[in-house]
Amino acid sequence: MEFKRETLQELQSKLREMSALTKNVPCGLHQCKDDEELTIINMSDSFFEMFGYSRNDIEERFQNRFARMIYKEDRDAVFESMKHQLAFKNDLELEYRIPIKDGGLVWILDKGRLAVGEDGQRTLYCVMLDITEQRKQREALRLSLERHQVIMDQGTDIIFEWDMDADSLTFSKNWSKKFGYTAIREGISSRIPQSPNIHPDDMAAFIAIMTDTAAGVPYSETEFRIKNAKGRFTWCRIRATTQYDNNKRPVRAVGVIVDIEEEKRERQELIIKSQNDCLTGLYNKAVSQKKMEEYLEWKDCEKGALFLIDVDDFKYVNDQFGHLCGDKTLSKIASMMKNKFRFTDVLGRVGGDEFLAFLPGLSDQLAAELADKILIGIKEISFEEYDIHLSCSIGIAFYPKDGRDFYSLFSHADQALYYVKNTGKGSYAVYNPSMHEYRVSLDEHTWS
């Protein structure tokens, strides 16, 4: 009898512990039949607390049918999911809503297991968690992601993510919209440096930003050209931000690829405007000097010729026919020069009616032949509305014979030009030292 009393006490103690467990765990527990309406067999105290119903409420309002407690808009989907899951295993995981007594709705995560008794009775044992707040957060996140997706789809920028451990890239849909093909996504560290879709002149910059990002540089930015499906390269700017794991190891990079083709074009136009004479399109004086000095500092520049070209009696054109005619005359002369000189030559307007041309690598003989062509080209310029006969004078100095820097060459070419202007015009002259004496004596005679 004593043994039975102790066994009974132990059993009662365990029952109390089990009751305390089912009463205090933060979830609802219920047992129901696996029938058409999930007839309730048993419920925990926490089950009632979760929904606000008493045992009598559930019996009177739902007739102890758990299916009737499920929100009617979710009911069909719940049974369909149960049928599908139980066809493969005995475990269930469901999410659905249940109306609570105060009129609201709670989202439930229901994890259950099907047990079959010796009598063939199919019973479901379920644990239910209130996930209403998680669902609200999940929905808020979904809407936020949807908003961001809408914004990304409406724009033209390409969002990307680089998983460094997997060495894989993912892109937003704008990549295929922009370039017309699927980008490299796997094994990018080895495949992208071999890709023909990045301009070969820009590959070093692209590899540098990959290397910096993989090394943990927090933010990197560079510009490079990407080829589209039609073979045309587009200037893009890439910005990448590195993300780290708990050990501060770089594991991911997210960023954006922006089309800067228009920006590049506008920038180039500004450069051209800042460098070029607005009337003729030739270099202005400062840029002409800079470009010429770059050639003179170039070790492979062994020889060259500097032409200073002055339009004869240009003041007469302005005075007789007006400044609009004068501007048109200068534009026609500039066009003629572009046709006569090489694209590698430096062509500039250095005064009102004075032009400069530096020709690297030109010999004395070729310089003389080219000077004759310029003289003829000026004379061949004509106007339908004006009876104008043009001519020009040309002074020539050679590098390195007549000077090794810009100022020496310009001064000597100017002295040769002065000589031509004062000995008949309409011709050319190559600098020689006696021209300096000629200019000095002529200036002294003028002032005497």
Image (cartoon, rainbow, N blue to C red):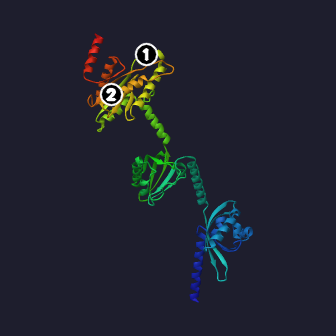
Q: Is residue 44 left or right of residue 191?
A: right
- Residue at the extreme top: 448
Q: Which image quarter holds the C terminus?
A: top left
* 333 shown above or below 21: above
> In the depicted view, which residue is nearer to us: 269 or 146?
269
**Disc 2 designates what residue?**
368
Q: Amino acid at mark 2?
A: Ala
Distance in Å between CA atoms under marks 1 and 2: 28 Å
Q: Residue 230: x percent and y percent?
A: 51, 48
Q: Amino acid at mark 1?
A: Tyr
Q: Residue, x 37% and y 32% (percent of image)?
A: 346
Q: Is residue 388 left or right of residue 9?
A: left
Q: Residue, x 55% and y 46% (percent of image)?
A: 155
**Disc 1 designates what residue?**
316
- Secondary structure under the numbered disc 2 in the rendered image: helix
Q: Residues within 10 Å of mark 1 (few under 14, many from 20)?
A: few
Q: Quadrant of residue 429?
A: top left
How many marks on residues? Answer: 2
